[in-house]
Image: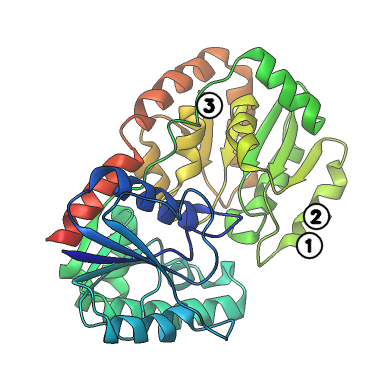
């Protein structure tokens, strides 16, 4: 069978969750399938190791003079004149194909909580996802929560949705020794004790309430370390809020991939205050690193984290502050969460995700 895959997201230099999803699935497909023929479509030079693969993988660069519409138009032309049996992509599909189209939907936050998004992004995402869900023959949802949202807003798509959970990078996300922790503290000028968040710095991730809660902590020995690039909405407000405690709040900006896991593993507590997620890979990464997790009490994070995290009301900075203080002061609870977290994270993997995804594509 001939399977087409779109690699533009996997090929991005600075990846977030959806791009890493595309990257890991492509790499796993190379390992688990030597029978079907895969055609990988891209529009810029492929980074290693994306551009290499077994004999049943071929790579096609499709030139396009415009900055936009490569997926919708250029890839459509390719698939109309050179069709594949199955075409799989994440979040976006060509406008036209002649084979079966399978797409992964990561979340519908712009429908559920539109105020968390920049107005232009909100409009674009709504239009794009309406087209994708209408076009797709099969839809993969990365969580039951996301599947429920798709069925709520697009009831006509209910019977073509399958839930396949994301994975996390078990090879990189592991506990580290004291020497590595000290190296990270020296490299980034970090304090001995800190609460850590990594991801986009924006309103959707609820960083404002995390900063407000941090200001309310009774325990002043801890610092707050925020890593990640500015998001599309709310960054300046976040910077302004942090000014009141600028001696104890640290912004690291974009973190290189080689330091990502080691920084998580160096933290005393990992905080994930997001108001909306489609899945929540970072809490699994923190659990895999042996770090206690405190996360928003929203359905999807409880679906992923189960009993291995402390949950708080994302709309209450006071609730977050109280639960952080309780966790900081209870070493037995911290140790308990480390053990539960390692067991919970072990239930998920990119290999499992890829095998289930490939089986659904081939149905």
Q: CA distance from mark 2 to mark 1?
A: 5 Å
Q: Residue at x 30, y 40 (%)?
A: 351
Question: What percent of the width, then of the height, locates residue 281?
Answer: 45, 44
Q: Earlier in the sequence, mark 2 or mark 3?
A: 2
Q: Earlier in the sequence, mark 3 or mark 1?
A: 1
Q: CA distance from mark 3 to mark 1?
A: 29 Å
Residue 292 image label: 3
The picture places residue 61, in percent across and down from the top left corner, at 45, 71
Q: Give the total of numbered labels.
A: 3
Query: Residue shown at 29%/52% (left/top)?
Result: 55
The numbered dot on residue 239 is 2
According to the image, label 1 marks what residue?
236
Q: Quadrant of the N terminus?
A: bottom left
Q: Is residue 337 left or right of residue 322?
A: left
Q: In the picture shown, does residue 135 fall above or below 332? A: below
**Which percent across, then down, holds residue 65?**
57, 86
**Would you identify the image quadrant in which residue 190 lies?**
top right
Q: Quadrant of the C terminus?
A: bottom left
Q: Is residue 331 left or right of residue 167?
A: right
One can see residue 282 in this view: yes
Residue at 20% x, 77% y: name it: 99
In the image as oriented, which residue stretches furthest toward the front? 55
- In this picture, residue 102 sits left or right of residue 288: left
**Front-lying residue, 283 or 316:** 283
Determine the secondary structure under disc 1.
Answer: helix
Q: Label 1 crowding class (10 Å Cα cut-off): few <14, some 14-19, many 20+?
A: few
- Asked whether the residues under the numbered discs 2 and 1 touch, taking CB atoms below 8 Å apart as contact, a structural biologist would say yes
What's the mark number on residue 298? none
In the image, 77 versus 207, the foreground residue is 77
CA gap, disc 2 and disc 3: 26 Å
Which structural element holds mark 3? loop
Considering depth in this image, is 140 or 276 the residue closer to the camera? 140
């Amino acid at each position: 069978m001939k399977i087409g895959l779109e690699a533009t997201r996997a090929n991005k230099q600075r990846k977030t969750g959806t791009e890493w999803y595309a990257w890991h699935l492509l790499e796993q497909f190379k390992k688990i399938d030597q029978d079907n023929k895969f055609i990988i479509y891209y529009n810029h030079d492929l980074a290693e190791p994306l551009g290499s693969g077994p004999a049943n993988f071929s790579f096609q660069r499709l030139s396009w003079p415009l900055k936009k519409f490569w997926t919708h138009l250029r890839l459509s032309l390719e698939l109309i004149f050179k069709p594949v049996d199955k075409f799989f992509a994440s979040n976006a599909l060509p406008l036209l194909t002649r084979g079966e189209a399978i797409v992964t939907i990561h979340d519908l936050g712009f429908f559920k909580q539109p105020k968390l998004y920049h107005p232009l992004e909100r409009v674009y995402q709504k239009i794009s996802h309406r087209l994708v869900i209408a076009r797709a023959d099969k839809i993969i949802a990365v969580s039951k929560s996301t599947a429920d949202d798709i069925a709520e807003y697009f009831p006509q798509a209910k019977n073509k949705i399958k839930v396949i959970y994301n994975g996390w990078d078990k090879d990189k996300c592991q506990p580290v020794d004291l020497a590595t922790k000290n190296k990270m503290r020296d490299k980034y000028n970090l304090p001995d004790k800190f609460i850590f968040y990594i991801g986009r710095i924006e309103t959707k991730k609820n960083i404002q309430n995390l900063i407000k809660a941090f200001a309310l902590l009774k325990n002043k020995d801890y610092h707050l370390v925020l890593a990640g690039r500015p998001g599309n909405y709310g960054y300046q407000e976040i910077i302004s809020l942090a000014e009141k405690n600028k001696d104890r709040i640290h912004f690291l900006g974009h973190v290189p991939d080689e330091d990502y896991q080691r920084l998580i593993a160096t933290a005393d507590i990992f905080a994930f205050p997001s108001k909306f997620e489609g899945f929540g890979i970072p809490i699994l990464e923190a659990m895999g690193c042996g770090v206690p997790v405190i996360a928003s009490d929203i359905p999807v994070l409880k679906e992923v984290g189960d009993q291995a995290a402390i949950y708080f009301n994302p709309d209450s900075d006071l609730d977050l502050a109280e639960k952080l203080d309780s966790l900081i002061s209870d070493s037995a609870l911290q140790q308990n969460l480390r053990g539960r977290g390692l067991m919970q994270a072990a239930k998920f993997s990119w290999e499992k995700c890829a095998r289930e995804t490939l089986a659904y594509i081939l149905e």
